[in-house]
Image (tube, rainbow, N blue to C red):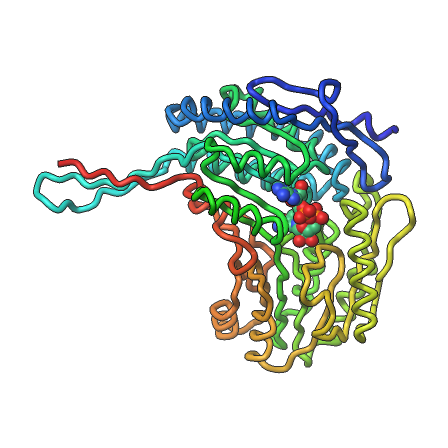
C-alpha cells in the first residue's frame, strides 16, 4: 500500500484529546483511484458523543466571551497554518476523494480565504439602535452567537464545506461539533489539527465520526445543540431539518441541485463550452452546483454539442495524484453504479451518447466524461441529480419555454445563462427559480458572497454576511 505513506493519522478530537483508531473500532478509508485501503477511521462511541456535548457547552461559554478581535487572531493563525501545509493537505484530499491535485489546491485556497474572511467579518457583527418609544428609552437589537452547533459535511468538498461551517460558527462566537464525511476524513483531521496548533481553546471545535444517521440523531436530540448545518442530499437534509424543527432549533441546509444552463443564440459559444465544460467535469461532476441540464437554442445546438463532445473526449481521466490528469475517479462505487444506470435509462428513452457513457477499467471508480443529446423529458437524468460526469443537452426555441423547463424541477440551487443581450440576462436572472444565477460566468462560490439554494435545494446561505448571521440570533433590549 504505497500511497498510504502520504496519508494522515486519523483521530477523533473530543474534549481537547485525540482518540486514534487503536482505541476505537471503525472503518477503512479507501483511495477511489485504486480501491486500496489507506487508513482506518475510529468511530465515536455514545460516551464520546456525550463528552463532546458536555465539552461543547462548556467551551461555548468561553468562546462567546472571547473578544471578537482575539477570536479573529486565532482564526487567522489557523488560516496561516493551513496555508503552510496546503500542499500536503492537497495530497491527502486527492488521495481520499480522487479529484486532481490542482482542484484540491484550488479548493484549499478558497477554503482558507473563507476562513480569513469570516475571521474579519466576526469583528463586524453589528446590531442596531432603534428609535425608542419614550424620550429616555434605549432600544437595541443585538446579535448573539446562537450556541453550540452540530455540523455535517459531505465527501465531495471535504475542505470547503468543512471550513465554511467552522468559519461561520467560530466567527460568530459559537462552539461546533463537526461530523465530517467518513469517506474523506483526513482533510477534516488536518483542519482540526491546524486549529489546535493555532491555540483554539479546547473543545471549541471537536471532530467526530461514526454511522452518519446514528451520530446526527444523537447530537440533534441533545438540549446542548442550538443549531445544525448540513451539506448533502435533499433526502437526508429534509430528515435532519424535520428533527431540528421538532426542537425549534435553527438550521442551514445546503442540499442537492440540478442546475440548468441556458445557452442563447447570441452567446459566445466558445466561452460557454470552455466555462461549462470545465465546470461540468470538475471533481468528476460531483459538485452540487455543477451544470447538469444543458438547454441550447436550436440555432447553436449542433455547434455547442459537438464542441462540448470534443471538450469531454479530450479530458485526461486518471489518478488525481498524476499532475497530467484533468479528471479523477468518482468518489465511490455507488456513484459509478448510479452513472451506469442513468446512461442506460437515457438510452432507453431515446438519447444519443456522443462520447463516454461507460466505466473505465475495473480498478478504481473511473467513469468516462459523457455527453448525450436528444434527451427526452422522461429520462431520469433530467429529474434526478446526476452528481457525475454526464452532460445531457436539449434544444429549445423560445425564452418562455426554456424558463419553464429550467424551473420545472423541485430543485433551485444554481443556474447558468449565456447571452450577449442585457435584456435576456435581466429577464432570465429575474425569472429563474434558483438561489444563484451566473451570467456568462461559472463562478457562484466566493468567500464574500452568500451561497445557498431555494426550493428543495436548501435553506439559508453560507459565505458572506449571511453566512455569519446564520450562527447568530437576535435579542431585543429595551432599557428605560
Ligand atoms: P448520502 O445522502 O447517503 O450522503 C451524503 C452525505 O451526507 C455523506 O457525507 C453522508 O456521510 C452524510 N449523511 C448521510 N446520512 C446522514 C445522516 N442521517 N445524518 C448526517 N449525515 C448524513 O448520499 P451519498 O451516496 O454519499 O451521495 C449521493 C447524493 O448525495 C448525491 O447524489 C448528491 O445528491 C448528494 N450530495 C450532495 C452534496 C452537496 O454538496 N450538496 C454533497 C455530497 C452528496
- Residue drawn at (42%, 31%) of the image: 173
Question: Would residue 246 appear left or right of 418 to someone viewing this image?
Answer: left
The image shows a total of numbered marks equal to 0
- Residue 251 is situated, as x and y percent measured from the top left of the image, at 48, 45
- Residue drawn at (46%, 33%) of the image: 223
Question: Would residue 218 appear left or right of 349 to someone viewing this image?
Answer: left
- Residue 117 is situated, as x and y percent measured from the top left of the image, at 48, 38
Q: In which quarter of the image is the C terminus?
A: top left
- Residue 97 is situated, as x and y percent measured from the top left of the image, at 74, 40
Question: Would residue 103 appear left or right of 67 to someone viewing this image?
Answer: right
> Is residue 444 shown above or below 398?
above
Residue extending furthest toward the left: 135
Depth check, front residue: 58 or 357:
58
Q: Is residue 232 visible?
A: yes
Depth check, front residue: 47 or 438:
47
Depth check, front residue: 107 or 182:
182
> Is residue 299 shown above or below 453?
below
Q: Quadrant of residue 357?
A: bottom right
Depth check, front residue: 154 or 301:
154
Q: Quadrant of the N terminus?
A: top right
- Residue drawn at (61%, 23%) of the image: 48
Q: Quadrant of residue 22?
A: top right
- Residue 465 is situated, as x and y percent measured from the top left of the image, at 42, 45
Q: Quadrant of residue 208?
A: top right
Q: Is residue 170 visible?
A: no
> Is residue 293 shown above or below 255?
below
- Residue drawn at (58%, 33%) of the image: 178
Amino acid at each position: 500500500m504505497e500511497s498510504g505513506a502520504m496519508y494522515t493519522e486519523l483521530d477523533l478530537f473530543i474534549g481537547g484529546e485525540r482518540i486514534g483508531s487503536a482505541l476505537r473500532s471503525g472503518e477503512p478509508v479507501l483511495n477511489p483511484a485504486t480501491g486500496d485501503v489507506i487508513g482506518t477511521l475510529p468511530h465515536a462511541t455514545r460516551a464520546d458523543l456525550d463528552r463532546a456535548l458536555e465539552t461543547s457547552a462548556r467551551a461555548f461559554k468561553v468562546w462567546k466571551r472571547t473578544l471578537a478581535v482575539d477570536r479573529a487572531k486565532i482564526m487567522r493563525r489557523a488560516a496561516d497554518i493551513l496555508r503552510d501545509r496546503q500542499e500536503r493537505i492537497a495530497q491527502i484530499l486527492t488521495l481520499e476523494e480522487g479529484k486532481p491535485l490542482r482542484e484540491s489546491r484550488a479548493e484549499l485556497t478558497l477554503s482558507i480565504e473563507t476562513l480569513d474572511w469570516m475571521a474579519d467579518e466576526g469583528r463586524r457583527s453589528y446590531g442596531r439602535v432603534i428609535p425608542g418609544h419614550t424620550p429616555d428609552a434605549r432600544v437595541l437589537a443585538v446579535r448573539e452567537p446562537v450556541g453550540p452547533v452540530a455540523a455535517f459535511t459531505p465527501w465531495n468538498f471535504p475542505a470547503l464545506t468543512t471550513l465554511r461551517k467552522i468559519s461561520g460558527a467560530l466567527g460568530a462566537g459559537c462552539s461546533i461539533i463537526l461530523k465530517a464525511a467518513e469517506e474523506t476524513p483526513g482533510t477534516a483531521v488536518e483542519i482540526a489539527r491546524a486549529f489546535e496548533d493555532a491555540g483554539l481553546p479546547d473543545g471549541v471545535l471537536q471532530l467526530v465520526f461514526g454511522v452518519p444517521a446514528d451520530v446526527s440523531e444523537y447530537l440533534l436530540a441533545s438540549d446542548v445543540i442550538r443549531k445544525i448545518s448540513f451539506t448533502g442530499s435533499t433526502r437526508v437534509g429534509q430528515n435532519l431539518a424535520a428533527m431540528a424543527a421538532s426542537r425549534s432549533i435553527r438550521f442551514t441546509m445546503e442540499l442537492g441541485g440540478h442546475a440548468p444552463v441556458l445557452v442563447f443564440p447570441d452567446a459566445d459559444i466558445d466561452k460557454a463550452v470552455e466555462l461549462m465544460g470545465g465546470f461540468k467535469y470538475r471533481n468528476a461532476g460531483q459538485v452540487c452546483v455543477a451544470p447538469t441540464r444543458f438547454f441550447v437554442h436550436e440555432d447553436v445546438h449542433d455547434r455547442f454539442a459537438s464542441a462540448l463532445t470534443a471538450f469531454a473526449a479530450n479530458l485526461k481521466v486518471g489518478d488525481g495524484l498524476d499532475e497530467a490528469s484533468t479528471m479523477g475517479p468518482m468518489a465511490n462505487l455507488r456513484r459509478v453504479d448510479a452513472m451506469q444506470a442513468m446512461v442506460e435509462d437515457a438510452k432507453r428513452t431515446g438519447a444519443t451518447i456522443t462520447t463516454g457513457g461507460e466505466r473505465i477499467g475495473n480498478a478504481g471508480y473511473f467513469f468516462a466524461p459523457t455527453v448525450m443529446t436528444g434527451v427526452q423529458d422522461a429520462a431520469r437524468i433530467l429529474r434526478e441529480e446526476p452528481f457525475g460526469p454526464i452532460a445531457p443537452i436539449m434544444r429549445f426555441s423560445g425564452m418562455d419555454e426554456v424558463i419553464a423547463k429550467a424551473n420545472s424541477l423541485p430543485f433551485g440551487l444554481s443556474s447558468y445563462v449565456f447571452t450577449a443581450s442585457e435584456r435576456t440576462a435581466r429577464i432570465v436572472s429575474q425569472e429563474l427559480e434558483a438561489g444563484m444565477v451566473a451570467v456568462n460566468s461559472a463562478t457562484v462560490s466566493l468567500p464574500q458572497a452568500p451561497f445557498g439554494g431555494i426550493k428543495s435545494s436548501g435553506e439559508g446561505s453560507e459565505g458572506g454576511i449571511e453566512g455569519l448571521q446564520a450562527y447568530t440570533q437576535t435579542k431585543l433590549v429595551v432599557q428605560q
